[in-house]
Amino acid sequence: MAREGQEARRPHGELVADVLAVLWAAGEPMTARQVKGVLRQDLARTTVTTILARLHEKGTVERTRPGRSFAYAPVSDAAGLAAGRMRRELEKEPRRDLVLKRFVSSLSTDDGDVLRRLLIETEAGTEAQAGAAGGEAVPEGGA
C-alpha cells in the first residue's frame, strides 16, 4: 500500500516494458536521460540506467558510447523478443516434442492456421534456397 503523497509502485516488468517501448518508438539509440525524459514519470535516472544495464547484460539491447554516456538500442522488435523467449524456454525442455504438441493444441483455430501457413512458407523458402545453392531438395523419406 502506498503512503500518502506517494504513488503505488508499478511492477518491475511493466517499467521494463515501458523502457523497451520508448526505445522501439525512437528508432535510434537513446541515453538513460533521454529515455527518462520520454517516460515523464517520477523516476530517478539511476533507475532507468539500471534497467538499461540489465537489458544490455541479457542481450536485449546493445549499447554504444557516442559521448560521455551510453546510448542504448533494442536488438530486436517486440515480436523478436517474444520469439527469443519462446525459443529459450523450449531449449530448456528435454521433451521438446511434448511441449510443442501442447503448445499447438492450445492455439486458437486462427493462430493454428497462421502457424500452418508460416511452416509451409518456411519449408518452401528452405527448398528454394537449397535449389539456388545447387543442391536438390530431397523428398521426405529419403532419396
Image (cartoon, rainbow, N blue to C red):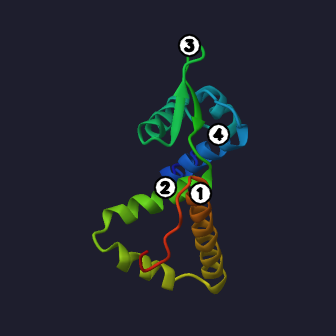
Mark toward the viewer: 1 or 3: 1
Picture coordinates of residue 56, whole percent (x, y): 47, 36
Report the amino acid beneath label 1: Gln
Query: What numbered label is drawn on residue 68?
Result: 3
Report the amino acid beneath label 4: Leu
User: Which residue is denoted by mark 2 in the rendering?
Assistant: 84
Q: Residue furthest left?
A: 94
Distance from disc 4 to disc 3, alpha carbons, whole Å, reads 19 Å
* Mark 4 neighbour density, 10 Å: few (under 14) some (14–19) many (20 or more): many
Mark toward the viewer: 2 or 1: 1
Mark toward the viewer: 3 or 2: 2
Distance from disc 4 to disc 2, alpha carbons, whole Å, reads 18 Å
Residue 112 sits in quarter: bottom right
Distance from disc 1 to disc 4, alpha carbons, whole Å, reads 34 Å
Secondary structure state at the residue bearing disc 2:
helix
Secondary structure state at the residue bearing disc 1:
helix
Report the amino acid beneath label 2: Gly
Distance from disc 2 to disc 1, alpha carbons, whole Å, reads 24 Å
User: Which residue is denoted by mark 1 in the rendering?
Assistant: 129
Q: Is residue 143 above or below residue 130?
A: below
Distance from disc 1 to disc 3, alpha carbons, whole Å, reads 45 Å
Secondary structure state at the residue bearing disc 3:
loop
Q: Residue at x 50, y 76 (%)?
A: 139
User: Which residue is denoted by mark 4 in the rendering?
Assistant: 23
Picture coordinates of residue 26, whole percent (x, y): 71, 37
Compare residues 33 and 118 and report the one nearer the observer.
118
Report the amino acid beneath label 3: Arg
